[in-house]
Image (cartoon, rainbow, N blue to C red):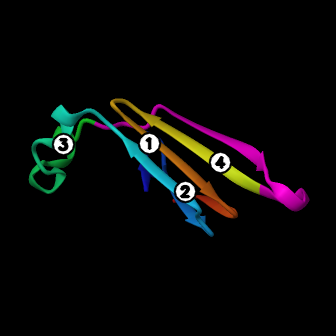
Amino acid sequence: MFEDTDYNVNLLFTGCSKFSFITSVEDRLKPLKELTKPQIPYFIQDIEISKLDIEGGKTLLKCNIFMPPLKVEVVCTKMFIDKV
């Protein structure tokens, strides 16, 4: 769930072959479960979706989510985006 000022967006990925989280060590020292919502340091600033051509003429979807200091990369067969 991506919370925005005007509305929320639900992102759902299926058929994933890659899922990567990259962040700084300092941000992982205190477990997120212990933080209140305003204390969580991540806020989605940008989402990029591109096609990734693979063997046999097939295509996967590559999604990069930028929420400094966290970067997320997902490679999947389908992606669903709904305004909530």
Question: Is residue 50 located in the magenta-colored stretch of the structure?
Answer: yes
Of all residues, the one furthest to the bottom in this rendering is 15
- Label 2 to label 1: alpha-carbon separation: 26 Å
Q: Measured along the vertical axis of the image, is residue 67 above or below residue 73?
A: above
Q: Are marks 2 and 4 in contact (CB under 8 Å)?
A: no
Between disc 3 and disc 1, the foreground one is 3
Residue at label 1? 4
Q: Residue at the location (18% across, 51% down)? A: 32
Residue at label 3? 28
> From the viewer's perspective, is 21 left or right of 65?
left
Q: Residue at the location (55% across, 52% down)? A: 74
Q: Residues within 10 Å of mark 1 (few under 14, many from 20)?
A: few
Task: Find residue 24 and report its image quarter.
Answer: top left
- Residue type of the residue flagged with mark 2: Lys
Q: Measured along the vertical axis of the image, is residue 6 above or below residue 18?
A: above
> From the viewer's perspective, is 22 left or right of 65?
left
- Label 1 to label 4: alpha-carbon separation: 22 Å
Residue at label 4? 62
Q: Measured along the vertical axis of the image, is residue 65 above or below residue 2?
A: above
Q: Are marks 1 and 4 in contact (CB under 8 Å)?
A: no
Whichever of callouts 3 and 1 sits on the residue coming sooner in the sequence is: 1
Residue 9: in sight, yes or no? no
Of all residues, the one furthest to the right in this rendering is 57
SS at mark 1 in the image: loop
- Label 2 to label 4: alpha-carbon separation: 9 Å
Residue at label 2? 18
